[in-house]
Image (spheres, rainbow, N blue to C red):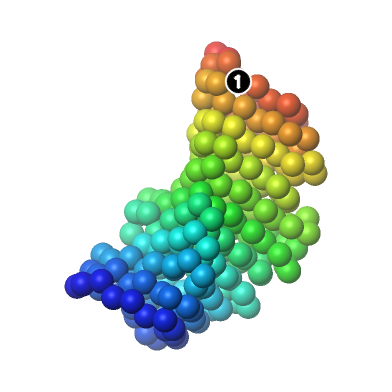
Amino acid sequence: GGAASVENLSVPTGTTLTGAGDLTVGNNLAWSGGTMSGAGQTVIASGSSLDVTGSVSLQRLITNQSGGVINLTGTGAVTTSGDVLRLDNQAGGLVHIQNNNGFAGTDGNFETITNAGTFRKTVATGASTISNITFNNTAGTLDFQGGSTLAVSGTFNHSGASSVIAGTVNASGGGSSSGSLALASGTQVNLTAGTHNLAASSSVTGLGRYRVNGGTLSVNGAVSADNLDVLSGTLQGAG
């Protein structure tokens, strides 16, 4: 049950990494299948990487520290369960999606992903999903290159100084926003379903488009938005 560290580790199909102790990876964790579970956490240390190359089951917290990288390549896809925090991508950490897969919860009792670092997509140009999961973008950056899309069907929250520097975000599960959201030129955030709450004093800045496109935007106080489109859906609130 104590803490342990390892430089290189492989978790293939049919195997389980489990336990109450924390495991720190110093160089590379190759995860091609199987399960991570237990009350402990797997820590991807600065300068190390986690390579997800197949369908895997996450029932344990992964903490990606500053300078750590999590790669989804090939058929890499992550299914989460347990209804608690499952991925903490800390400031300076990178989640690099290089396919059209992503992260999916197993039921309506959402797990949580927190992003204070960067979620990036390259290589594949279609949509990657974060489904049945609460996605908290806490001063994090979304960088979906090549015209690619992030589709969030769970709750999408952003706080602090968050940004979208490339691509499109389609949010269909509602959520809450505070702080500032900077949208670079050519980017879009589409509120396609659900109710999205903008807190008082929050702002949406930049040349990108913030779009009510089937969902509901509830403005809860004085807010500012540089470029807002109401294509369909509802704009409401006291702001």
Number of marks in picture? 1
Residue 214 visible, this angle: no
Image x and y of residue 43, in percent: 39, 67
Residue 44 found in image quarter: bottom left
Q: What residue type is labelled 1?
A: Val
Residue 17 found in image quarter: bottom left
25 sits left or right of 96 in the view: left
Closer to the camera, 34 or 194?
Answer: 34
> Is 146 placed above or below 229 here?
below
Image x and y of residue 209, in percent: 75, 36
> Is 113 placed above or below 204 here?
below
Image x and y of residue 104, in percent: 50, 61
Element at badge 1?
loop
In the rendered view of the protein, which quadrant contains the C terminus? top right
Residue 101 found in image quarter: bottom right
At a point 54% along the width and 55% down the height, the residue shown is: 92
Instruction: Please tell me how crowded label 1 is: few (under 14), some (14-19), or many (20+) other residues with Cα within 10 Å.
Output: some
At a point 74% along the width and 57% down the height, the residue shown is: 145
Image x and y of residue 166, in percent: 73, 50
Q: Which residue corresponds to mark 1?
A: 223
> Is 138 placed above or below 150 here?
above
